Image (cartoon, rainbow, N blue to C red):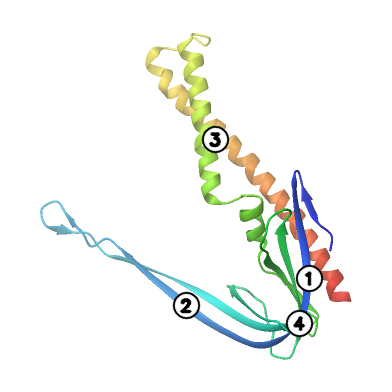
Amino acid sequence: MDDFIHKNKVVEFASEAGEVLDTNKYSKTEVTGKGGGSVGQGYNTDVKITSTTKTINELWYKTDDDIEKHIKLYDSPVAVRPGQKISMISTSIKGKDGSKEVVLVNHSAKKHWIININFILANIFKINSNNFLFYLFLNVAIAFGIALFVMKSHIIDVGRGDIISYAIVSGIIYGAIWVTKIIIKVNMLRTKLNTHLEKLASELQSN
């Protein structure tokens, strides 16, 4: 199968065919609570209860090599039933061990689903919330430092009392510009990757 290449990253894909043995679809609700502690002179804060429900779709299938496998999908529209012929497209990064299912093709129903595009973005291209917040803070801090240096060096004539304010505003503006650029780049990468996965799935489905 064709690799997906983006800058210095090469993402490899492989497929394996099989037959669905069994499925199990169910919902799981997680409940969390906040508050309820004492504040000031014996007053209690209100308890806030939030719940999150996830739909879990478990799938067991046997490959053409007679190996039984199991996959668990969260909030996925995938629909299969025992006896149907399927193919799984898995991905891995070149030079590293391990793989992850990213596309499921149902040959019997002539349908396919992209099931794990976020895995590729997060684990191969390192696009996740933690990295995003780290680099956002780093860029804002750099912009703040540069603005502070410029103003303290009197390159720009600003009153001493306004130096911090101008530096903060500069950091915020630069951060907003950086965030916009990153969002555009991520959306372009996601679109390009989605197109590639659709192409692989369509080719496999037509066979």
Q: Amino acid at mark 2?
A: Lys
Q: Amino acid at mark 3?
A: Gly
Q: Quadrant of the N terminus?
A: bottom right
Viewer-side residue, 193 vs 120: 120
Q: Residues under labels 1 and 4: Cα distance?
A: 10 Å
Viewer-side residue, 102 vs 47: 102
Q: Quadrant of the C terminus?
A: bottom right
For mark 2, give the secondary structure.
Answer: strand
Tell me how many marks there are: 4
Q: Residues under labels 2 and 3: Cα distance?
A: 38 Å
Foreground disc of the pair 4, 2 = 4
Neighbour class for label 2 at 10 Å: few (<14), some, many (≥20)? few
For mark 1, give the secondary structure.
Answer: strand
Q: Which residue is mark 2?
A: 28
Q: Earlier in the sequence, mark 2 or mark 3?
A: 2
Q: Which residue is mark 4?
A: 18
Q: Earlier in the sequence, mark 4 or mark 2?
A: 4
Q: Residues under labels 4 and 2: Cα distance?
A: 28 Å
For mark 4, give the secondary structure.
Answer: strand
Judge left or right: residue 83 versus residue 34: right
Q: Which residue is mark 3?
A: 175
Foreground disc of the pair 2, 1 = 1
Mark 4 touches mark 3? (CB < 8 Å)? no
Q: Residues under labels 1 and 3: Cα distance?
A: 41 Å
Return the x and y of residue 32 as percentages of the image width and height. Answer: 36, 67
> Considering only vertical position in the picture, is 117 above or below 64?
above
Return the x and y of residue 49 as percentages of the image width and height. Answer: 34, 68
Q: Earlier in the sequence, mark 2 or mark 1?
A: 1
Q: Earlier in the sequence, mark 1 or mark 3?
A: 1
For mark 3, give the secondary structure.
Answer: helix
Q: Which residue is mark 1?
A: 15
Q: Amino acid at mark 1?
A: Ser
